[in-house]
Image (tube, rainbow, N blue to C red):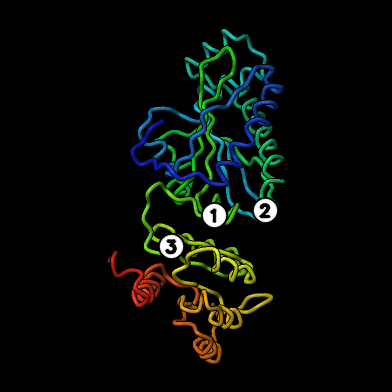
Amino acid sequence: MENSSNKKISSSKLEETLTSTFPRICSDCGKLTNKQFFLTNPVLQSTTLKSFLKDTSKSYVMAKLTIEEFYEGEMYLIFAVKDAITIGSILLTIDDSAIRENASKGILDNDCTDAFKEFSNQVCGMLDNELRPKLPKPIHLKLTSTVLITHENTTTVLSEEAVNEECLILTATMRILGFDDGQFILSVSKLIGEEFFCEVIEEDNKQFKGTILAVDDSKTDLRITRKLLSSEYKVLVTDNPNNALSMLQKERIDLVLMDIYMSGIDGIALCERIKRNAMSHAIPIIMCSSSPTQDNVIKAIRAGAVDFLVKPFTRGKLIEKINKHLINNNVLLNSL
């Protein structure tokens, strides 16, 4: 489905990893359905579920996959109703001609719905088995629900945040031999998708105001920071303070946002190390904490930090501080 609000994005480890699961899915789905099953022509786009559904009269069946262990969030498997009917009916071993007729009429009865749910559960297991050894941190996927979704009921079936959050949506042509081609659709929050490989998945030709490195041993706080900033800045994150110096050597970083209390090495000690390094000493560092003391604020400034923020901070306050110091370092002078 084409949509003017869908944004094509640059190639990424996420896209490569998701498409690498296709051979396993095709093989296992072929055995499950006793039909030849193919997935081809994958395209990864950045959009929202609201925009994805906006310009179509189709209805879909959506399977919600909960992401657990190190990563937290949701994935969605999405199929047009006619494709869900085809798949569910095949599992019920209905005659092919009857399947095609039911699909054309949009007849999705309870038995077919249950069969499609079982198919979704099997695909969830396939994705889980394929992604687990390929991602750098532990992951587990489990099917939690399947639901009929239309443009009209999207906001009642899903939360407002879920339908409006920027997503990475992978679509592929799905071919089951003997039936009309359909679409295999996999959606994941852009923030979660980027977190899999600690990468920034950029839209083609997107211009950022600057590159921010966020260092915090709280995954939750890193997610919040990326959510607040990623529309305007390229945001790199690490929950391991020891990785920060190597990232500063490899990437062109304009500003560091760093928590003061971290396990292993605290923010003040890391700030001092960054300032002693000839390649990174000029990069402005903003320290932050949810429970600062006057003594630690003074120590942070003495260690080389240019500013201090108290958590939780608002998007407006965070961007105000960042812009101030990027301007001071001549990063934003040509873009404001």
Q: Quadrant of the N terminus?
A: top left
CA separation in Å, label 2 and label 1: 12 Å
Report which residue position mark 3 lands on: 229
* 104 is higher (above) or lower (below) than 83: above
- Between label 1 and label 3, give the one nearer the viewer: 1
At x 60% / y 53%, what residue is drawn? Answer: 197
Report which residue position mark 1 lands on: 199
- x, y percent for residue 131: 67, 43
Image quadrant of residue 58?
A: top left
- Between 276 and 126, the residue placed more toward the observer is 276
Report which residue position mark 2 lands on: 136
- x, y percent for residue 299: 54, 89
> Dot 3: what SS?
helix
* Residue 155 showing in the rendered view: no
> Dot 2: what SS?
loop
The reply, left or right, for residue 76 in relation to residue 124 is: left
* Mark 2 vs 1, N-terminal side: 2
- Between 120 and 114, the residue placed more toward the observer is 120
Amino acid type for the residue under numbered disc 3:
Leu
* Mark 1 vs 3, N-terminal side: 1
* 57 is higher (above) or lower (below) than 302: above
CA separation in Å, label 3 and label 2: 24 Å
- x, y percent for residue 74: 57, 47
